Image (tube, rainbow, N blue to C red):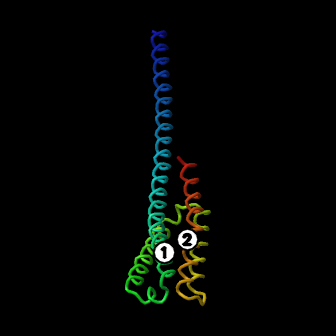
Amino acid sequence: MALEIETALIALGGVVIGGSISSFTTLMVHRGERQKFRRERSWELRREAYTSIFGSLDRARDILAYINEAYKDDPHGYDASKERREAQGQMIELFQAARSTFHTNRLMLSKAFVSEYQYMLEQINEASCENLIPPEVAEKTLLAVQTALPRLELLARRELSAEN
């Protein structure tokens, strides 16, 4: 009888220990999967933010380049034209879309990207605040965007590749 009780207790101990190990292993796997999901979701949100910002800035840069070239051909005529007002309106909308996406996702973006983006905005603001004629404003704004975009893209690529 004592042998049967001993055998039953050993079996019960084995079940308890096996169940505990199984539960602990399941808990650790679940925790790891949850962390992996969070990292992947965070990466996706960053990628979407960067893609949206760069999409708007690329189109704005192209319009700026067009405006800059048009000013070189006929500064006075182009400045007074409906075409310039429409192009400038589109460009402003694109900059606002990029800025809106930037502010919406600012906490997800890297500090280096935020700093570089803000520096680009400062350069653009300086170009429009100085006492320059419109062709010079267009040229300085285009230069600020053309200088900043490659650096911003490099920062975004580094961040996204480091986390993937």
Question: Badge 2 local density, few (<14 within 10 Å), some, or many (20+)?
Answer: many
> For residue 122, what is the image quadrant?
bottom right
69 w.r.t. 20: above or below: below
Determine the secondary structure under disc 2: helix
Indicate which label's residue lies in the foreground, 1 or 2: 1
Determine the secondary structure under disc 1: helix
> For residue 100, what is the image quadrant?
bottom left
Amino acid at circle 2 = Val
- Taking depth in this image into account, of 156 and 35 the one nearest to the observer is 156
Looking at the rendered structure, which numbered label has been put on residue 118? none
56 w.r.t. 76: above or below: above
Question: Badge 1 local density, few (<14 within 10 Å), some, or many (20+)?
Answer: many
In the picture, the quarter occupied by the N terminus is: top left
Q: Which residue is mark 1?
A: 64
- Taking depth in this image into account, of 5 and 49 the one nearest to the observer is 49
Q: Residue at x 48, y 54 (%)?
A: 42
Amino acid at circle 1 = Leu
Give the residue at the far front of this rendering. Answer: 73
Q: Position of residue 6 (x, y in %)?
A: 49, 14
Q: Position of residue 98 (x, y in %)?
A: 46, 70
Q: Residue at x 45, y 11 (%)?
A: 4
CB under 8 Å between callouts 1 and 2?
yes
Q: Position of residue 51 (x, y in %)?
A: 46, 60
Looking at the rendered structure, which numbered label has been put on residue 145? 2
